[in-house]
Image (cartoon, rainbow, N blue to C red):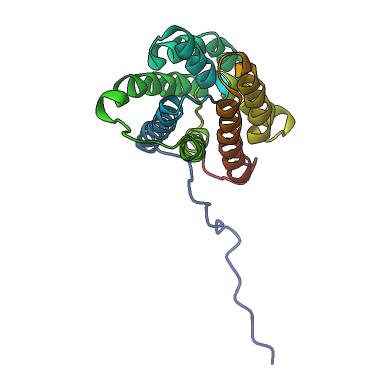
C-alpha cells in the first residue's frame, strides 16, 4: 500500500518574501553616514592639494583658484542638476539627493574645525581618500540617493542603459582631473588620478545592477 504524500491545502498561501525596503530611519542613517565618509575623504584630498572627479572635483578646483570654502561652492555647483534628477530619477531620489548634498556641504564646512592633519602623505591621502569617498557613495546609492551632479548622470545611465555607475563615473572623473593640468603640477595630477581610480574601482566592484536587493 502506498502511503499518501502530505499536500498543502489548495487555498494555502505561499510564504511571503520578506520586506527588504529601507525604513525611513535607515535611509536617514545611511545618508548621514555616507555623507560623513565622503566629507572626510574630500578633506583628505583638500589637505593634500589633490583633486577628484564629479562636482566635488569642480568645487575643489574652484576653491584652489579662489580660496572659497568647499562646502558652499559644492552646494552651488550641484544646483543645476536637481531639475534633471527630478525629471529623470523621480521626486524621492531628488529629495534624498538634496538632503545628502546639503548634509555634505554642512559637514564639509565644519569638519576642518574639528579635524586637522599635522602630517599627511599625499599618496596615502589619494588611496584612503578614494576609499572613503567610494564607500560613502555606495551607502548613498544603496539608499537611492547621490551627491548630485555627475552621480545623477551615472546612475541614470545605469538604470536606463545598464552601464555600471562606477565605470561611467570613472570616465567623467578622469576628464575633470586631467583638466587640472593647467592648475597644479603633474605629480599631484597623477595622485589625483590614483585617487579617482581607487574611488571608481570601489564603485565598480560593489555597485552592480540587481545585486543589492533592498530599495
Q: Nearer the viewer, residue 130 or 189?
A: 189
- Pick out the residue farthest to the bottom: 1
- Residue 144 pos. (x, y %): 51, 31
Residue 193 visible somewhere in the drawing: yes
Q: Nearer the viewer, residue 86 or 178?
A: 178
143 relative position to 187: left or right: left
- Residue 26 pos. (x, y %): 38, 38
**Picture quadrant where residue 180 is located:** top right
Q: Nearer the viewer, residue 192 or 92?
A: 192
86 relative position to 4: left or right: left
Residue 90 visible somewhere in the drawing: no
**Picture quadrant where residue 116 is located:** top left
- Residue 20 pos. (x, y %): 48, 45
Looking at the rendered image, the quarter that the N terminus falls into is bottom right
Q: Residue at x 47, y 37 (%)?
A: 139
Q: Residue at x 63, y 35 (%)?
A: 166
Amino acid at each position: 500500500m502506498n502511503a499518501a504524500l502530505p499536500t498543502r491545502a489548495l487555498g494555502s498561501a505561499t510564504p511571503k518574501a520578506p520586506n527588504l525596503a529601507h525604513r525611513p530611519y535607515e535611509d536617514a542613517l545611511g545618508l548621514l553616514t555616507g555623507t560623513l565618509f565622503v566629507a572626510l575623504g574630500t578633506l583628505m584630498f583638500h589637505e593634500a592639494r589633490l583633486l577628484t572627479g564629479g562636482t566635488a572635483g569642480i568645487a575643489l578646483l574652484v576653491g584652489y583658484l579662489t580660496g572659497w570654502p568647499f562646502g558652499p561652492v559644492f552646494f552651488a555647483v550641484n544646483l543645476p542638476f536637481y531639475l534633471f534628477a527630478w525629471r529623470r530619477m523621480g521626486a524621492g531620489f531628488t529629495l534624498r539627493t538634496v538632503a545628502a548634498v546639503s548634509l555634505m556641504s554642512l559637514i564639509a564646512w565644519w569638519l576642518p574645525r574639528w579635524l586637522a592633519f599635522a602630517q599627511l602623505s599625499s599618496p596615502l591621502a589619494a588611496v584612503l581618500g578614494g576609499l572613503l569617498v567610494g564607500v560613502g557613495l555606495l551607502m548613498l546609492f544603496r539608499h537611492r540617493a547621490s551627491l548630485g551632479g555627475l552621480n545623477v548622470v551615472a546612475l541614470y545611465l545605469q538604470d536606463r542603459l545598464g552601464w555600471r555607475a562606477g565605470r561611467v563615473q570613472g570616465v567623467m572623473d578622469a576628464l575633470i582631473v586631467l583638466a587640472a593640468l593647467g592648475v597644479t603640477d603633474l605629480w599631484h595630477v597623477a595622485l589625483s588620478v590614483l585617487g579617482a581610480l581607487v574611488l571608481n574601482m570601489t564603485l565598480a566592484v560593489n555597485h552592480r545592477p540587481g545585486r543589492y536587493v533592498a530599495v
